[in-house]
Amino acid sequence: MLILAVETSCDDSAVALLDGCRVIAESVATQIVVHSSHGGVVPELASRQHLEILPGLVEEVLAEGGLKGIRDLDVLAATAGPGLLGSLLVGLSWTKAAAWSSGTRFLAINHLAAHLHIHYSHEHPVEFPAVALLASGGHTSLFSMSSWEDIQLLGATRDDAAGEAFDKTAKLMGLGFPGGAELDTAAEAGDPTAVRLPAPLPDPALPEFSFSGLKTAARLQWEGGAELHDLSASFRKVIVDVLLSKLLHQANEIGAKSVLAAGGVVSNSLLRSELRRRCSIAGLSLHLPAGSHAVDNAVMVGRAAAAVLDRTPEASSPMNVNAFARWTGSFLEPLCT
Ligand code: KG4
Ligand code: ZN
């Protein structure tokens, strides 16, 4: 089952070719250079960039997979939301048009479900029940999973996402864009106990997060003269501690066998090492994506489509499916109808 997957929910244009959940080829074009002089993603520029970049990426991926064109595919899949509407509309409209003109089946995919589906694999199946952490620039959420068909939201952030807090604090300290990775690097040379920061919503039993107060506390420390590396290390540690304590509490509550980690913040070096260490102590099987598959990519969209097709081989999305900015449900489904 040859699937071409398209992801344009924010500032990364990404295309992947998969045979079921096996990756044949993938290509990602980040727009960092375009947005860095503005200190953040400019939505209209992101949409225009997707429009320019996407056709080239598709050609590249099809050529690498030895395909002549769209007609050789079985399914076309694209992210429909949540994300930046202008960006989503480019990938979604391009994919619908390609599907319609070639008579190929079309699937509209939920971006959050796609992040978790980076772990959908026949070779390394997830043992359920599982708890999933999704920590990205737009979302910080915990899910409980009794199977791939039953993904239930436990709780999410009440304000900023963890990635947003990393990015905004990095910007405040004059680090580059996107700031999460820069702050992570700066933290390596700092003392995580040097700067006192409040643990945000620290109750491990509460599966919700809040990072805006922490961001303000970091700003006050910065304005009060805190040293850059020490503040970065302290800030990173508070976020990692709160993510892990809530994740592991929920794992214990539901008797989880596995932990799934997904989203750009999962590239964070301390979060990765602590996830490995603490899941090993707790006897949990950890599914941790490579850094390139933690951040936005199209393989996750392709695997979400593969999961839909494994479950319902004749599945398809209607051609009038729309892009959406926010997801507000409690059960997460990969397919948008
Ligand atoms: O999943 P993603 O690519 O896009 C969204 O769906 O939001 O996540 C991007 C986020 C950004 O906020 C970025 O700063 C953060 O992931 N990020 C990191 C690291 N690398 C990327 N945050 C902390 N440490 C990192 N090493
Ligand atoms: Zn994402």
Image (tube, rainbow, N blue to C red):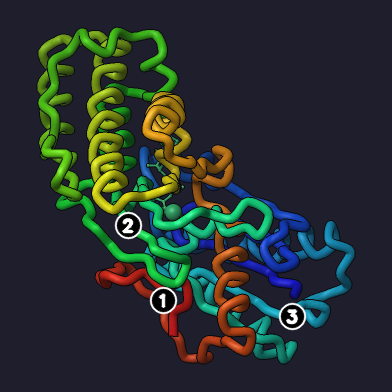
- Mark pair 2, 1: CA separation: 23 Å
- Mark pair 1, 3: CA separation: 23 Å
Percent position of residue 23, x then y = 72, 57
Nearer the viewer's eye, disc 2 or disc 1?
A: 2
Q: Nearer the viewer, residue 289 or 251?
A: 251
Q: Which residue is mark 3?
A: 74
- First reached walking from the N terminus: tag 2 or tag 1: 2
Q: Quadrant of residue 183?
A: top left
Residue 13 in view: no
Q: Is residue 320 left or right of residue 91?
A: left
Nearer the viewer's eye, disc 3 or disc 2?
A: 2
Disc number at residue 143?
2
Q: What secondary structure is found at the residue carrying circle 2?
A: strand
Percent position of residue 137, x then y = 36, 47
The 10 Å Cα crowd at callout 3, few under 14, some 14 to 19, many 20 or more, is some
Q: What secondary structure is found at the residue carrying circle 3?
A: loop
Disc number at residue 323?
1
Q: What secondary structure is found at the residue carrying circle 1?
A: loop
Classify 85 as above or below 158: below
